[in-house]
Amino acid sequence: MKTAAPVTIPFKQEGRTVMLLGGLGSCDMTRFGGTQYAKIVLEKMWGLPPALDMEYEKRVQAAAREIAKPESKQDHKRLEKMTEACFDSEDFKEGRRAFMEKRKPAFKGR
């Protein structure tokens, strides 16, 4: 079976700001060993790859594609809905509470 070339976002321009999106989620040492960080920075691989939530990944990719567009072509209503969804998430609220209480947050990927 032959696959098509990967689809890329045209943000690869010098001087362009790129925001990396994604969740913190939970990760133990078994799953951490399968991350790109472990592979590139630690030069070691072990255990299982990180858990994958395809619905979450689709939302992150949609946000990245929208943000990468020139501002004049962005769907501002869509970006506003994405921002509201982020601020309404349990993890965002937990992060704020943990910051105010000066403790580590307990993120759940929600």
Image: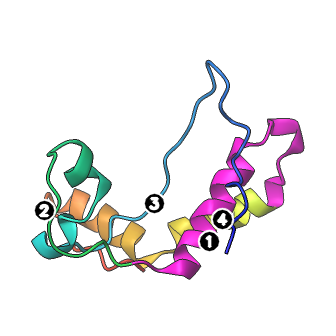
Which residue has dot 4 on it?
A: 82
Q: Nearer the viewer, mark 3 or mark 2?
A: 3
Q: Nearer the viewer, mark 2 or mark 4?
A: 4
Residue 12 position in % (x across, y down) = 65, 31
Magenta stretch: includes residue 25: no
**Image height of 11 relative to 98, above or below:** above
Residue at 88% over, 37% down: 72
Indicate the secondary structure of the residue bearing disc 2. loop
Which residue has dot 2 on it?
A: 103
Magenta stretch: includes residue 69: yes
The region drawn magenta spans: 52-77
Snapshot quadrant of residue 96: bottom left
The residue type indicated by label 3 comes to Gly
Q: Quadrant for the C terminus, please.
A: bottom left
Indicate the secondary structure of the residue bearing disc 4. helix
Residue 76 position in % (x across, y down) = 81, 53
Q: Is residue 1 left or right of residue 22?
A: right
The residue type indicated by label 2 comes to Arg
Which residue has dot 1 on it?
A: 58
Q: CA distance from mark 2 to mark 1?
A: 31 Å
The residue type indicated by label 4 comes to Met
Residue toward you, 54 or 99: 54
The residue type indicated by label 1 comes to Lys
Determine which of the numbered discs, if any, sits on residue 22 in the image.
3
Mark positioned earlier in the residue sequence (3 or 1): 3
Q: Quadrant for the N terminus, please.
A: bottom right
